[in-house]
Image (tube, rainbow, N blue to C red):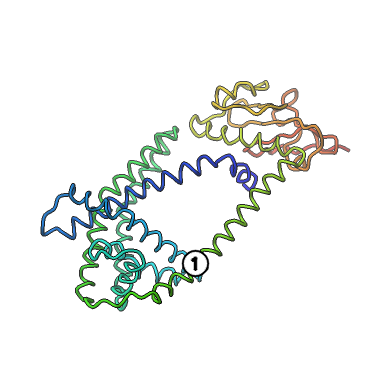
Amino acid sequence: MIITTLYLLPFSLKWIIFHFFSTILLSFIFYWLIASLIFVIKDREERIDFKKGLKLGAKKIISLFWIFFLSFIINSAGMIFFIIPGIILWVWFFLASYVLIYEDKRGMAALLRSKDLVSGNWWGVFWRIIIIFGINFITSSWSLILFFISKSFFQFSFVVFFISILGGFIEMLFFSPFNTIYFALIYENLSLIKKTELEITLKRKLKYLLPTILATIIIGIIGCAIFGILYFGYKSMLKEPGGKELMDLIKVMLKLEMYYKDHGKYPGVFGSNQWDILKKELKMDLPKGNYEYWVSKDNQNYILKATLKSWSYFLKNDIDGEPFGPGLVNCGVQGENEREFCISSKEFKKEPKFRD
């Protein structure tokens, strides 16, 4: 698992960038729709349509995004201190988006106004949030059932992916408006109870911002340390004898597992080295080197082999012997003279052979 993670670290950089920007884009769309819906609820007596709500909501996207960002950072900081403070902060700031739309307060001012509304009614708000989320979870469990049923009947991953996306879209279409209306009514009731507003001072803002900044710095340091360990671990592994070959085989192994997930079997024909067919079957550029690929008779197992130039520490834990029978792939025997490095995602019951 660690080796795979080390390999994927640089390999998945483009996917990390893609998911980062796509998440930002989808977040803006989500915040736009939420802001528009709150406007429609707020001005329901004027009977504004959703089109006008979209125009009004577009003006609040950045502000709403900033509120969610601040809330996320502060709540995350609270979670560091044994979780409970994070839950308290989460409930306090839960109505900040409604404060933005109803009262036009932004940033920390919206968060602190939300806290003032919830204070004294914390448990009441908390249980209402938990109940509505519990109802959402129970009523949306059908999408999980649909996902597992589709996974049982369809081997092709894109079919399962499409069904899961469809289920998520239907949930968002029905439950997001219901949740938004429900929490808007909670805000309206609390704002009637607490019409007097407390002054939003710099001191009150710093009370939450300073610990948050400190916690963010700590999280950043820990994150950089973990990234550094993984990255430099990957680099040092490449310098080890057999390190490059191991990473090359893991790259092919990941593609083979994706192929198996879609087709229910591994590619190739039993009885000979099938390395050359992998470029076409897996739709990938194969690494250059002395590599082999062997598949079992039932196409439910395989061996990836690399012939190394010198002995490697990795040879201590590889597959040895002739796992597919005499005359086929030879994975060598344990010892200082071994150069045959063989791996597979499957386990072999065959006992390895050792040199005397």
Task: Tell me how many marks there are.
Answer: 1
Q: Up-down: is 129 above or below 263?
A: below
Kindly state the secondary structure of the residue where label 1 is placed: helix
Which residue carries the number 1 mark? 213
Tell me residue 244's x, y (percent).
Answer: 70, 36
Residue type pointed to by label 1? Ile
Where residue 89 sits in the image (x, y, percent)? 40, 70
- Viewer-proximal residue, 158 or 90? 90
Which part of the image, by quadrant, shows the C terminus?
top right
Q: Is residue 274 left or right of residue 84?
A: right
The residue closer to the viewer here, 18 or 172, is 18
User: For the point 17% across and 49% down, which residue is it?
Assistant: 52
Write the residue at 25% across / 58% down: 180
| Residue 38 placement (x, y as % from top left) | 23, 57
| Residue at image point 72% right, 46% down | 236
Q: Quadrant of residue 8?
A: top right
